[in-house]
Image (cartoon, grey):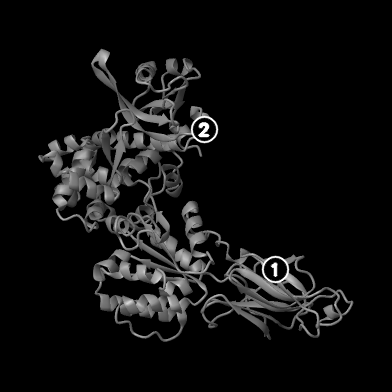
């Protein structure tokens, strides 16, 4: 963490100190200067090895029993400093000065008035011993509760974190909660979404503990955990025989201080010590060591089947968590900003390959981004189709990371079936040569692993389609797997020209539909005449014409008991085709058929989504019930 401020003034003499962790402290004092007052503040992040100077309130340093505030003089002085968190602190004396940014700026508080002899922060209350203003004696003192726990407000998101505002707010609010009793949070998400980056920033901001587990034996992991506690506390830690020793020691170590403790890669610990969740449950329960602690324990992992199972069914930790956060890939708009792409068409193409996973740009591709639309083909060849980049094998590794997957060939076959457009249970089973009941388990495992998403048909009860959640897996199955031998030998430049058309039809087209549904679910209520309650796709049977009408983007209003379901919008999506009035007529026919089935379609908006534009006749024929959404509209915040 970078230290703000400048050098400590020469000749600095300390008068009051405050500690916010075993490593971080603030000291109020004075130093010789040419223009009084000469009050200064020094700060350390490393147990006093190094110090930095900070601004102080422009008030001279004094002492409480000799201060001029006991006379009729109006000249104030200060003599004490207390910080509740690394950001929120107080300087007190003949008045109170408050900072919310770690001492960079100070503001005077008009309350409680008079002199403050002593100030402490206990149970998220700021308590002070005060003397009424202009009192001539210190014999009359008041014990005052100055304010509620504003010192424990969540810290601001560090500037180096891109996006993740909602995630940071949830994590920081949980970790800074000063109420008594240890609490549990669970953070999960597929690998490379930035979970560790986020949690390391949280632990740094709040002076907490960050322990990344490794795939080792229980004995070695306990030794590493003890080493981390030694680094945090600066004191010896006894060797742990097992987690029955380690978890209670952790809770006691924090005392009554609010301390976030992040255990990353938690599935590795569970693999080595299957009983660990039960031990945590016992210590968090009645009579456990957590009742006298304010540890905010955050368990994090990427094995989604393991992390999802921690809080489900009969799991020991079910009902114990105060926070359950799944860190998702960036949405399509955030992803475009993260990749610094301003061309919407290029943004869709890149998102169709790498989705919103931040590490693909920063770590796996070393900041290699396509310069413009003309550079896209060359970018694909030099990155995802290049056997020398880590991204080349990433899709295969995503499947291998899941502990529940015992037969990788079966699961790869299921994903290949979906990538080829077989998105129903029957279609998947037929594609891989199995019976429908034989694919139920792998489908369930892939859902739990967040690699497949099951999406209900909004117009046919009991029907559903499967969609691959990770665009890179779709790209691998549709483009790379069939040419794997050639690609491993560096054949990307020869493979891509023949695969590009398949990429546009099997990868980009379906993915563009997903982007359009994401647009609809976050659309302003004015776009479709009301807030969306459910967004998906569906099929409308047309018996008279012996056909079916596929609705790519269906927007339904929230369900109201006893009333027909209101259809806000019916939409069709075309990535590489100019849309015409014929597409609107298909949607109008579907609207009429749904009205016969009992849906409320009186105000349904017919929406065309296109990556290639709209013909002049369609644009000229727009009415209040027709909406055209192009690439520019999709990428407007």
Which tag, 2 or 1, sits closer to the chain's start? 1
- Which image quadrant is residue 439 in? top left
Specify whether 479 is left or right of 51.
Answer: left
- Residue occupying the point 35% across, 46% down: 355
Where residue 417 sits: x, y (%)? 19, 39
- Residue occupying the point 34% across, 18% down: 593
- How crowded pointer 1 is (Cα within 10 Å; few <14, some 14-19, many 20+) is rated as some
Under circle 2, the secondary element is helix
Q: Does residue 51 appear in the picture of this structure?
A: yes
Is 405 situated above or below 573? below
| Gap in angstroms between the C-alphas marked 2 and 1 | 44 Å
Q: Does residue 608 appear in the picture of this structure?
A: no
Is 373 situated above or below 285? above
Where residue 523 sits: x, y (%)? 48, 35
Between residues 403 and 244, which one lies in front from this camera angle?
244
The residue mark sitting in front, 2 or 1, is 1
Q: How many marks?
A: 2
Where residue 272 sits: x, y (%)? 25, 70
Where residue 179 sits: x, y (%)? 53, 66
Residue with the mark numbered 1: 146
Residue with the mark numbered 2: 525
Between residues 226 and 133, which one lies in front from this camera angle?
133
- Which image quadrant is residue 273 in? bottom left
Is 557 situated above or below 222? above
Is 328 situated above or below 592? below
Under circle 1, the secondary element is strand
């Amino acid at each position: 963490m970078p230290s703000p401020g400048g050098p400590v003034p020469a000749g600095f003499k300390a008068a009051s100190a405050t500690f916010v962790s075993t490593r971080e402290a603030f000291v109020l004092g004075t130093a010789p200067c040419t223009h009084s007052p000469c009050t200064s503040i020094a700060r350390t992040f490393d147990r006093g090895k190094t110090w930095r100077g900070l601004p102080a309130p422009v008030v001279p340093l004094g002492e409480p029993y000799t201060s001029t505030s006991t006379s009729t003089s109006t000249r104030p002085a200060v003599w004490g400093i207390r910080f509740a968190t690394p950001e929120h602190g107080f300087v007190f004396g003949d008045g109170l000065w408050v900072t919310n940014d770690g001492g960079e700026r100070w503001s005077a508080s008009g309350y409680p008035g008079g002199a403050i002899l002593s100030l402490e922060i206990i149970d998220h209350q700021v308590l002070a011993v005060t003397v009424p203003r202009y009192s001539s004696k210190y014999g009359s003192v008041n014990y005052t509760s100055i304010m509620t726990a504003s010192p424990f407000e969540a810290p601001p998101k560090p500037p180096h974190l891109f996006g993740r505002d909602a995630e940071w707010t949830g994590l920081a609010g949980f970790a800074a909660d000063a109420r008594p009793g240890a609490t549990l949070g669970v953070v999960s998400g597929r690998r490379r979404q930035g979970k560790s980056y986020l949690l390391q920033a949280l632990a740094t901001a709040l002076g907490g503990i960050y322990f990344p587990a490794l795939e080792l034996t229980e004995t070695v992991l306990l030794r590493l955990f003890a080493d981390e506690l030694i680094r945090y506390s600066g004191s010896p830690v006894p060797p742990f025989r097992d987690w029955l020793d380690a978890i209670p020691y952790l809770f006691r170590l924090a005392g009554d201080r609010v301390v976030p403790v992040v255990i990353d890669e938690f599935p590795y610990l569970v693999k080595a010590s299957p009983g660990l969740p039960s031990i945590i449950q016992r210590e968090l329960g009645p009579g456990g060591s957590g009742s006298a602690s304010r540890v905010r324990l955050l368990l994090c992992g990427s094995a989604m089947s393991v992390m999802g199972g921690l809080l489900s069914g009969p799991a020991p930790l079910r009902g114990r968590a105060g926070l359950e956060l799944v860190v998702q890939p960036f949405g399509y708009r955030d992803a475009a900003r993260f990749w610094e792409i301003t061309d919407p068409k290029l943004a869709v193409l890149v998102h169709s390959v790498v989705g919103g996973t931040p590490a693909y740009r920063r770590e796996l591709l070393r900041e290699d981004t396509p310069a413009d639309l003309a550079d896209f083909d060359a970018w694909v060849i030099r990155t995802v189709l290049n056997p020398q980049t880590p991204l080349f094998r990433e899709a295969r590794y995503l499947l291998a990371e899941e502990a529940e997957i015992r037969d990788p060939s079966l699961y790869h076959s299921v994903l290949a079936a979906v990538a080829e457009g077989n998105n129903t249970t029957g279609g998947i089973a037929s594609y891989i040569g199995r019976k429908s009941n034989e694919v139920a388990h792998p489908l369930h495992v892939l859902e739990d692993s967040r690699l497949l998403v099951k999406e209900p048909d909004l117009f046919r009860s009991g029907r559903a389609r499967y969609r691959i959640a990770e665009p890179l897996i779709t790209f691998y199955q549709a483009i790379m797997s069939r040419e794997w031998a050639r690609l491993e030998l560096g054949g990307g430049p020869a493979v891509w020209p023949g695969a590009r058309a398949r990429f546009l039809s099997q990868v980009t087209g379906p993915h563009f539909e997903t982007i359009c549904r994401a647009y609809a679910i976050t659309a302003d209520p004015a776009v479709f005449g009301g807030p969306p309650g459910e967004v998906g796709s569906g099929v409308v049977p047309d018996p008279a014409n012996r056909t079916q009408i596929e609705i790519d983007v269906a927007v339904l209003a929230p369900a109201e008991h006893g009333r027909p379901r209101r259809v806000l919008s019916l939409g069709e999506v075309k990535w590489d085709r100019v849309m015409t009035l014929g597409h609107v007529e298909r949607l109008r026919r579907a609207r009429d058929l749904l009205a016969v089935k009992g849906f409320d379609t009186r105000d349904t908006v017919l929406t065309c989504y296109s990556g290639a534009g709209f013909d002049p006749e369609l644009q000229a024929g727009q009415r209040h019930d027709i909406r055209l959404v192009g690439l520019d509209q999709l990428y407007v915040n």
